[in-house]
Amino acid sequence: PKILHFTAKLLWSVVKKETFDLIAGPYTDIPLATTLSLEYNWPMIFIRGEKKKYGMEKLIEGNYSTGQKVVVVDEEVSDPADSLQLLGRLEGSGLKIVGIYVLIDKGLGNLEAIRNKGYKCEALINLNDIFIHLFETGKISPDQLNQAKDYFKTKKIFSILPYI
């Protein structure tokens, strides 16, 4: 719980600068969206990956009205196509996307893919910053940093890690 509350606090420090009516999260990030909603007394909705096959068969759960402004929170953008589909569902329900805020950018170009579709998309931190911090604070050795660099080059994640 401590890490979840701390993470929500960090995310809120960025999100609160926007003008919005609702917090939205994908089904997989209900804990993060719920924590923000409860900690800051803000209404929340969540988006299912697919319609339920029972009950109301909704894609979007929660109370909302056409025209409301939504901030989407997520841990990361694993697949831009999935995120764009989620955003399309929100817009298809008459909601306006203010921005997408993620905790971590893995450097795979996923956030850029969303930005290229006209959405505001920001991350609190990226993997490059994490590895630099770990190296500078002695948490990883130069060899481990080089292993990370080699892995990133192989996966074409970050072209260059500074300080290497």
Image (cartoon, rainbow, N blue to C red):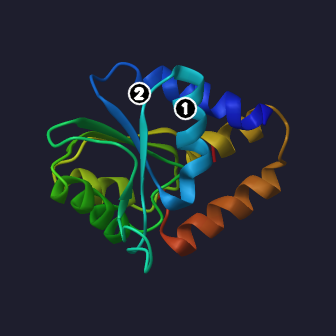
| Mark 2 to mark 1 CA distance (whole Å) | 10 Å
Give the image location of residue 146, x and y in percent: 71, 58
Residue 36 placed where, x, y %? 54, 32
Q: Which residue is mark 1?
A: 36
Residue at 29%, 38% (x, y): give it: 70
Residue 87, how many percent across, how many down? Answer: 27, 57
- Is residue 162 visible in this depiction of the protein? no
Q: Which residue is mark 2?
A: 15
The percent coordinates of residue 19 (x first, y second) are 27, 22
Q: Is residue 131 above or below residue 15?
A: below
Residue 96 falls in which quadrant of the image? top left
User: In the picture provided, is 157 more to the left or to the right than 110?
Assistant: right
**In the rendered structure, which disc, 2 or 1, sits on the residue that comes first in sequence?**
2
In this view, 112 is above or below 82: above
| Secondary element at tag 1 | helix
- Pointers 2 and 1 in contact (C-beta within 8 Å): yes
